[in-house]
């Protein structure tokens, strides 16, 4: 169980958010500008005093951000190399299989499709051995087809990996598929927290 | 065609040695200054920018003269370096390398700075979330991504150093075997009767070296680009 309790003045927006992230996927759900990404950035340590490289929090970005000069394998290995941990072949194989990216290992990110790129980005974050995985609108830059392609992997990840995940999205359909807990944000405040029934009145934008 | 006399070979070898040493010594400074100019804001930044580019716009003989009065054996910096580190520049090939490095420096800094400015900083953020501290982010992400610009800077500086004449001859003169480069030997040969044939041979060599540097840079830059960005 992880308790997030952050407060920050961001321009006109007063951010004051508190919630518990249990095992499974906690979705941060709300309209654009509600402060979702800011909360995630604060958890990741990008706006507080502890240097980000000391927090062991996996971060999957909207645009993937794979390193273009490294192969997929080197991208996946980057977190382990930077923390100086020994190579763990079994763990590597397990995550590569989970995300079904074994056939991509020797390619450059440039040669991947959008969906493949995001799967590698998820794998890269997982292989640094995180205590918590943050996913900031990981599907936002993908078209509908690729969204459908990648969601099952994220669901599998939720059920197999056992790492608490915080999932940022403004798409109700996406949250419904992946989340176990929903935290609704609006204007920098938590307006509701609970189960998937919180999404009942949310607009359904076509995904499934 | 390349039937050179020993003195001419000496000048060619010396030119190459001076250009290589000048470029290699300039590179760490070039990356550091390029980084400062691309990534930081500080009081006096435009002054630094100006000083770096001065050798490009000043007459080379002025640069050579300034080196002479600062780095000569009796001059303040030159005397200090001589007594504390045993480094002597005046009338030595090391002085020629210093002059060439300074003349090539602006050409080196500019592409490095542009390459650093073009890097997507979000990739550096991503590296930090993966556990890389700042020096490692720089070594494993920033530097490799700036490599095409660094290669361009190295080649331009090398080519400039290879052809440098004015600052070198002003600072360290034209001593055979010590500071007489291809350029200054060509100049000497054009001043003596019957030197035309030898000058012509050296001119050819200079052209060949310039082309070789150009092709090498094209090849290296293409390789780096293919590696990073696909075919």
Image (cartoon, grey):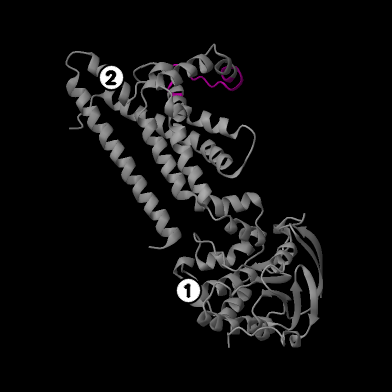
Q: Is residue A187 left or right of residue B151?
A: right
Q: Is residue A51 left or right of residue B115?
A: right
Residue plotted at (45% across, 38% down):
B108
Residue A68 in the image, given as x and y percentages of width and height: 50, 61
Magenta segment, which residues?
Answer: B81-94
Report in which chain the residue with disc 1 lies: A
From mark 1 to mark 2, how far is it between C-alphas?
59 Å
| Residue nearer the viewer, A174 or A152 | A174
Residue B184 in the image, given as x and y percentages of width and height: 32, 21
Assign the C terminus of chain A to one quadrant of the image.
bottom right
Query: How many other residues sit within 10 Å of disc 2, few (<14), some (14-19) or many (≥20)?
Result: some
Instruction: Provide the residue designation for mark 1.
Output: A113
Assign a secondary structure to mark 2: helix
- Picture quadrant of residue A84: bottom right
Q: Is residue B90 visible?
A: no
Residue plotted at (69% across, 70% down):
A134
Q: Let me know if residue B91 is in the magenta part.
A: yes
Residue A73 in the image, given as x and y percentages of width and height: 53, 68
The image shows residue A104, relative to residue B105, as above or below, that is below
Q: Let me know if residue B85 is in the magenta part.
A: yes
Q: Is residue A129 visible?
A: yes
Assign a secondary structure to mark 1: loop
The image shows residue B3, relative to residue A105, as above or below, that is above
Which disc number belongs to residue A38?
none
Q: Is residue A199 left or right of residue B148?
A: right
Report in which chain the residue with disc 2 lies: B
Residue plotted at (40% across, 16% down):
B170
Residue A60 in the image, given as x and y percentages of width and height: 63, 69
């Amino acid at each position: 169980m992880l308790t997030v309790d952050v407060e920050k003045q961001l321009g006109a927006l007063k951010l004051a958010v508190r919630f518990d992230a249990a095992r499974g996927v906690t979705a941060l759900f709300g309209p654009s500008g509600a402060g979702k990404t800011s909360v995630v950035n604060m958890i990741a340590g990008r706006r507080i005093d502890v240097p980000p490289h000391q927090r062991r929090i996996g971060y999957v970005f909207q645009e993937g951000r794979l390193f273009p000069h490294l192969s997929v394998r080197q991208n996946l290995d980057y977190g382990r190399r930077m923390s100086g941990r020994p190579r763990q072949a079994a763990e590597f194989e397990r995550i590569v299989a989970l995300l079904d990216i074994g056939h991509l290992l020797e390619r450059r990110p440039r040669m991947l499709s959008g969906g493949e790129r995001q799967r590698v980005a998820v794998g890269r974050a997982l292989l640094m051995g995180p205590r918590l995985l943050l996913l900031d609108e990981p599907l936002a830059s993908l078209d509908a087809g690729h969204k459908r392609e990648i969601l099952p992997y994220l669901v599998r990840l939720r059920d197999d990996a056992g790492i608490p995940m915080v999932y940022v999205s403004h798409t109700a359909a996406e949250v419904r598929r992946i989340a176990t807990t929903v935290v609704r944000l609006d204007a920098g405040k938590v307006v509701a927290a609970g189960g998937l029934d919180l999404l009942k009145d949310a607009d359904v934008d076509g995904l499934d | 065609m390349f039937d050179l006399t020993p003195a001419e070979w000496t000048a060619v070898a010396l030119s190459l040695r001076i250009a290589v040493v000048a470029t290699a010594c300039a590179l760490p400074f070039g990356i550091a200054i390029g980084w400062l100019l691309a990534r930081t804001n500080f009081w006096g930044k435009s002054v630094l920018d100006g000083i770096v580019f001065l050798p490009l716009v000043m007459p080379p003989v002025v640069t050579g003269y300034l080196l002479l009065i600062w780095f000569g054996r009796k001059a303040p910096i030159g005397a200090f370096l001589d007594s504390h580190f045993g480094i002597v520049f005046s009338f030595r090939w090391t002085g020629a390398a210093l002059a060439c490095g300074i003349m090539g420096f602006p050409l080196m800094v500019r592409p490095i700075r542009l390459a650093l400015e073009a890097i997507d900083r979000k990739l550096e953020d991503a590296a930090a979330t993966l556990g890389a501290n700042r020096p490692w982010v720089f070594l494993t992400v920033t530097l490799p991504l700036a490599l095409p610009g660094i290669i361009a800077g190295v080649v331009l500086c090398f080519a400039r150093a290879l052809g440098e004449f004015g600052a070198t001859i002003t600072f360290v003169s034209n001593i055979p075997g010590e500071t007489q480069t291809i350029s200054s030997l060509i100049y000497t040969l054009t001043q003596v009767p019957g030197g035309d044939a030898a000058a012509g041979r050296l001119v050819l060599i200079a052209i060949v070296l310039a082309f070789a540097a150009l092709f090498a840079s094209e090849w290296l830059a293409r390789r780096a680009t293919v590696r990073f960005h696909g075919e």
